[in-house]
Image (spheres, rainbow, N blue to C red):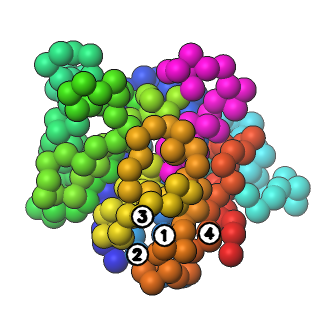
Amino acid sequence: MIKVAQVLLLFDEKNSADYGLALWAALVEAEACYNSGEKRLDVSRFYISPHIPALGFFSNILKSPVFSFFSSDSKSALDLLKQEERVQAKLSSDEVKSPDAKTYDQERLIKVTRDKLLRERFGSSADEMPLMIVTDRPITPPENWRYVIWDFPLEPQPNAVMSTVPVDPAYWQISDPQRVSTIKARTRAAIMSICGGFLGLPSCKNPRCFLLEHVDSVLALDRMNTFGKEHSSEIPNLVGRGFEPKRDDPDQIQKMAGA
């Protein structure tokens, strides 16, 4: 088992309102998936944004015992967002922008997050624990690339920064009635791949597998929704398990399906 920090870092209030909870649900779902049958990840999770969703008055009423008889066993990401996981702050983009000012530098994002968030909470161990950041800003791609979905900067430290920008249909000028569900499903596939890397699981060439070796487009993410039989020796209890690609209620915590 490894201890991992996951940070949802949303600079834009509207993005946080639109799909912040769906991304939080994706993070929770990925952790639950990898810990099914065996505890593999010990996750500390933080939501950083100028705006963090909170329960409203009517939501609190609906959660009261009077209404519990009518409720289902499904949970919303908001129900699982603890007070200590909320880091409400005005974020300084100047600290993490690339020199060209068009993208955000993933190495700076990692450094600022470790210095200002993790070290305060975990002390010296903050420099060693794997860190995953999911952000709503474009990160710096390799030269001659238009975009990059995620990157592993500052090796040999175990770090990953994933951008929601290219997984958003709006980025491609596509009108998607299930836009938030699409963003969630693609982000979750990326998170599953990143977590697999943190755990040292080998990659494969199965286009449907979360551990696909080369993810070169969002269309590849759309196909990644299960664990292939190629990994039966490392994670036998997860082979054939996965998620439905899209749901109408992206803020709800989705349970794994499959074998």
Tell me the kind of residue under disc 1.
Tyr
Q: Quadrant of residue 113?
A: top left
Is residue 183 on the magenta stretch?
A: yes
Q: Is residue 41 above or below residue 245?
A: below
Among numbered discs 2 and 1, the one appearing first in the sequence = 1
Q: Residue at x 51, y 44 (%)?
A: 220
Q: Is residue 222 above or below residue 177?
A: below
Determine contact: label 2, label 1, CB under 8 Å: yes
Distance between mark 2 and mark 4 Cα atoms: 16 Å
Residue 257, x across and y down, in percent: 69, 66
Residue 148, x across and y down, in percent: 34, 34
Residue on which the image places disc 4: 241
Q: Is residue 196 above or below residue 50?
A: below
Q: Are there few (<14), some (14-19), or many (20+) residues within 10 Å of tag 3?
A: some
Magenta-drawn segment: 169-189
Query: Considering the numbered disc 3 on the image, is that residue within a helix, a strand or a loop?
Result: loop
Tell me the kind of residue under disc 4.
Arg
Q: Quadrant of residue 65?
A: bottom right
Instruction: Answer whether residue 87 is visible to the viewer in this image.
Output: no
Residue on which the image places disc 3: 204
Q: Is residue 232 above or below residue 116?
A: below
Q: Taking 107 as reference, is 239 left or right?
A: right
Distance between mark 3 and mark 1 Cα atoms: 17 Å
